[in-house]
Image (cartoon, rainbow, N blue to C red):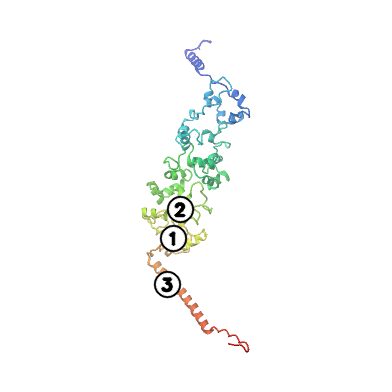
Amino acid sequence: MRPAGKMTVTGLVIVLALAGGFWAAPARGQSLSECMDCHSDAGIAREDGRSVSVSLDTFKKSVHGRADLSCVDCHQDLAGVKDFPHPASLKPIACASCHADADREYQTSIHGQSLARTEKSDAATCASCHGSHDILPAKDPESKLFRLNLPATCGQCHLNKELADQNHSGDVSKVESYFTSIHGWALARAGLTVSAVCTDCHGAHRIHRIEDPNSKVARANIPQTCSQCHLGVYDTYISSVHGRAFVAGNPDVPVCTSCHSEHQIQVTTDPNSTVYPTRVSQTCSACHENVALNLKYQLPTGRLKSYQKSFHGISSKLGDVTVANCASCHGDHDILPSTDPRSSISPKNLSKTCGKCHPQGSREWAIGNIHTAKRMEQHWIPRVLRQLYVVLIAVVIGGLVAFIAIDLYSRIKAHPRKKPDEPKKPAGGKD
């Protein structure tokens, strides 16, 4: 054993190092309690009237308070200040000193770039979203970033029409529509925190404009962004005719938002939904009735018109939600060309597809072409039936008109119109 009262060389080095660090470190300035001597006053404010009052209880409950940080850890230009009151103008808080990774992402974002362009920018800062002395973990229900609270936090700016017009940040009504969408409804009404919120689609610190290829909501990234929640649908879409074209880099192929819209996504049973049964044909026709796209990709034309003239189309227009629409026959996320044996409109599968609505139907029901437009049917049976139907209509209606005409003629012949009697002349009168 070492003799009591003697210190080893290692111990001496540690003591000297600690002492050297103590004397070399700059004075940290006032403690938290000393700061609160002034800032706990509810009436303390800057010259312009902005309050600088801080609740000690609120700060202690915050993420920084729980970590035992002091005021000068953030307000670093106050370190070593001994004369009070301290200068009214302080340097902006440098959150990057602790949160470097998040700051790097923020600097490249639309908010960070806007702030860099002008000091008077209204762009969101760290405090705008996280708070200041009341910052709480995102999983805390009281946090501004808790999923149930996040839309309202973003809405501080994006629901402000004056700010939106001033900063050209988009249509406020589109943002408002989120709150009545299936995502907003599930979040606010049902409390489903797994429902999509702003940051799921747009990102958190790394938010970019929709035109930026790095944006999560850039057209080329939409399927991947939606797949964060809808992975099964994504896998189905990627193997479809649309998905395969998307993977190949086709810039015109529809993505999730092309059919479902963006903020205002509604459940399919909502009449306002872009994929409500009676609105599906209009949604699909946005591409399939586009003359430029049809010419570019040599797609057949007149699909919507031929559907609207059919029994299905007429019934749909009258509000029938059970009648067949585009998705009923072609599928929705799993659309495949008719040449693919897995396709619902493959000749081998047509009877099964039609049988979903017509279980008593025969295989012959699917012989003819559905979208005939101005061309004739390919199979002779429906072509003959169509011609016979036209002749039958002409004969029946023509015969009916002829019958009515003959009947009227016979009635007129049997009852000729009598001439009115001439008025009698007065006695002794002159001609």
Label 1 and label 3: CA atoms lie apart by 23 Å
Is the residue marked by circle 2 packed among few (<14), some (14-19), or many (20+) residues within 10 Å? some
**Numbered-mark total:** 3
Tell me which amino acid carries mark 1.
Lys
In the rendered image, residue 79, in percent from the top left (x then y), is placed at 53, 22
Specify which label sits upstream in the sequence, 2 or 3: 2
Give the number of the disc on residue 305. 1
Tag 3: amino acid: Val
Q: Give how far across and how far down residue 366 sits, in percent.
A: 42, 62
Name the residue carrying label 2: 332
What's the CA distance linking mark 1 and mark 2? 20 Å
Q: CA distance from mark 2 to mark 3?
A: 38 Å
Q: Residue flagged by tag 2: what amino acid is it? A: Asp
Measured as percent of width and height from the top left, residue 242 is found at 41, 50
Q: Are marks 2 and 3 in contact (CB under 8 Å)?
A: no
Structural crowding at the residue carrying mark 1, measured as other residues with C-alpha within 10 Å and reported as few (<14), some (14–19) or many (≥20): some
Please tell me which residue is depicted at 47% across the width and 73% down the height of the picture.
397
Comparing 163 with 64, the one in front is 163
Q: Secondary structure at mark 3?
A: helix
**Location of residue 144 with respect to 251 vertically, above or below:** above
The residue that disc 3 covers is: 391
Mark found first going from the N terminus, 1 or 3 = 1
